[in-house]
Structures are given as structure tokens and as C-alpha cells.
Amino acid sequence: MKASRSMHKLAAAASATLMFAATAHGYSDAAVKDAEQLLEKVTRDVANGYGKASDRLLAEYYLLEMKYKAGRIRRSKFCDSVMPILESMKSLAQQQAQNGYLSVPEEIGAKRRYYKTEAFCRNK
């Protein structure tokens, strides 16, 4: 039962992410708006018990990435804002992996995102 509910939540989060990402046009204002709407949806879902903290962190990261790539925020603002989020995502992924709640590809994805962005932000 618990596994079925988790799979349902994961499928819903994945489809929402794909839906919003597919409608965004590159790194345009539309991409930023879609990312903002996704964050609002995920925030509601988490508040209602249908999402996880990691879903909200990922949506926050995605919004900052879209804002930076669309030229809405500077690199220094992006880096200052995104690194604490990514640190939380990496720590949460490690905890979830240790407890058997996260697959190896998901754990690698969280760590890759962190280290890639950390290297990018080193020369902000």
C-alpha cells in the first residue's frame, strides 16, 4: 500500500514536471512562468501531503535555473540562491538512499546537479 502510494506520487510529480517543461520555450519568459507555476503546484501538493520536500527543492532549483538562463537574474544571484537548495537536495538524497527510499540513478542525479553547479558557481 505504502509503495503504491509512493509510486503514484512519483508518477504525478514526473508528469507535472514534463508537462510544464514541455510547454516552456527554451529559456524565455514562458519558461520562467512555467517554472513559477510548477513551484506553486508542487508547494500546494507538498502542503496537502501529495509531494515530498525533495519535489519542492527540485522545483525551486528549476525556477532559479530558468530565471538565470532567461537573463532575469545575474549569475551571482543564481549561485547565492541555488547552492543552499542543492546542498539540501544532496543531503536529502543521501539520507533517502541510505534508508532505501531512493534509487541509485536518483542519488547520482542529485549529486551530479550539485557538483556541476558548484563548479559553475566557483567563478561567479
Image (spheres, rainbow, N blue to C red):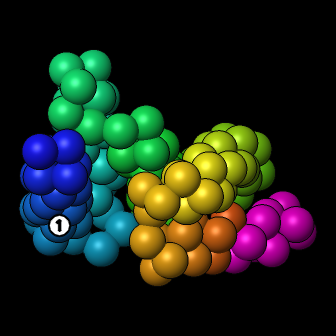
Residue 84 vs residue 4: left or right?
right
Quadrant of the drawing holding the N terminus: top left
Q: Name the quadrant of the C terminus.
A: bottom right
The residue lying at 27 percent from left, 20 percent from top is 47
Q: Is residue 16 above or below residue 111?
A: above
Residue position marked by numbered label 1 in the rendering: 18
Q: Which span is picked out in magenta?
A: 115-124
52 in relation to 116, above or below:
above
Image coordinates of residue 69 in percent, x first then y, are 49, 65
Residue 60 seen anywhere in this rendered image of the structure? no
Q: Secondary structure at mark 1?
A: helix
Residue under the point 50% across and 77% down: 104
Name the magenta segment's main secondary structure. Answer: helix
> Is residue 117 within the magenta segment?
yes
Residue at point 57%, 77% (across, down): 108
Tell me where residue 21 sits by quadrant.
bottom left
Question: Relative to residue 122, is residue 46 depicted above or below?
Answer: above
- As for residue 17 lying within the magenta part, the answer is no
Q: What is the x, y in percent for residue 109? A: 52, 74
